[in-house]
Image: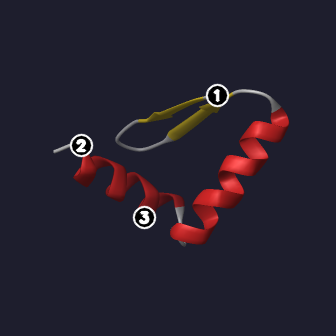
């Protein structure tokens, strides 16, 4: 499974079940994709 976070999008590569599991996991932490992207960019600094 591969997750690519760009400045305005998230790209998930993998098997369908892996992507569904990862989206469910992230939905517990973040309300929106925008929040997810902001958090990823703040962690990388």
Q: Which mark is nearer the camera, 1 or 3?
A: 1
Q: CA distance from mark 1 to mark 3?
A: 21 Å
Query: What residue do we see at 39% from left, 36% from top?
Result: 6
Q: Secondary structure at mark 2?
A: loop
Query: What residue do we see at 41% from left, 44% from top?
Result: 8
Query: What residue do we see at 74% from left, 49% from top?
Result: 21
Q: CA distance from mark 2 to mark 3?
A: 15 Å
Task: Tell me which label, 1 or 3, sits earlier in the chain.
Answer: 1
Quadrant holding the N terminus: top right
Q: Position of residue 4 (x, y in %)?
A: 48, 32
Q: Secondary structure at mark 1?
A: loop
Asked if the residue under mark 3 is in contact with the one under mark 2, i.e. CB atoms within 8 Å, the reply is: no
How many C-alpha atoms fall within 10 Å of the one at disc 1: few (<14), some, or many (≥20)? few
Quick check: 35 left or right of 42? Answer: right
Would you place residue 41 above or below residue 17 in this image?
Answer: below
Residue that mark 2 sits on: 44
Would you place residue 1 above or below residue 30 in this image?
Answer: above
Q: How is the image coloured?
A: secondary structure
How many C-alpha atoms fall within 10 Å of the one at disc 2: few (<14), some, or many (≥20)? few
Quick check: 16 left or right of 22? Answer: right
Q: Which mark is nearer the camera, 2 or 3?
A: 2
Quick check: 14 left or right of 26? Answer: right
Res 1 label? 1
Q: Secondary structure at mark 3?
A: helix
Task: Tell me which label, 2 or 1, sits earlier in the chain.
Answer: 1
Would you place residue 8 above or below residue 33 in this image?
Answer: above
Q: CA distance from mark 2 to mark 1?
A: 20 Å
Q: Position of residue 39 (x, y in %)?
A: 34, 58
Residue that mark 3 sits on: 35
Q: Position of residue 34 (x, y in %)?
A: 45, 60
Task: Tell me which label, 2 or 3, sits earlier in the chain.
Answer: 3
Asked if the residue under mark 3 is in contact with the one under mark 1, i.e. CB atoms within 8 Å, the reply is: no
């Amino acid at each position: 499974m591969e997750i690519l976070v760009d400045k305005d999008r998230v790209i998930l590569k993998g098997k369908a079940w892996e992507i569904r599991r990862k989206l469910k996991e992230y939905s517990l932490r973040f309300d929106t994709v925008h929040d997810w992207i902001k958090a990823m960019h703040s962690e990388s600094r």
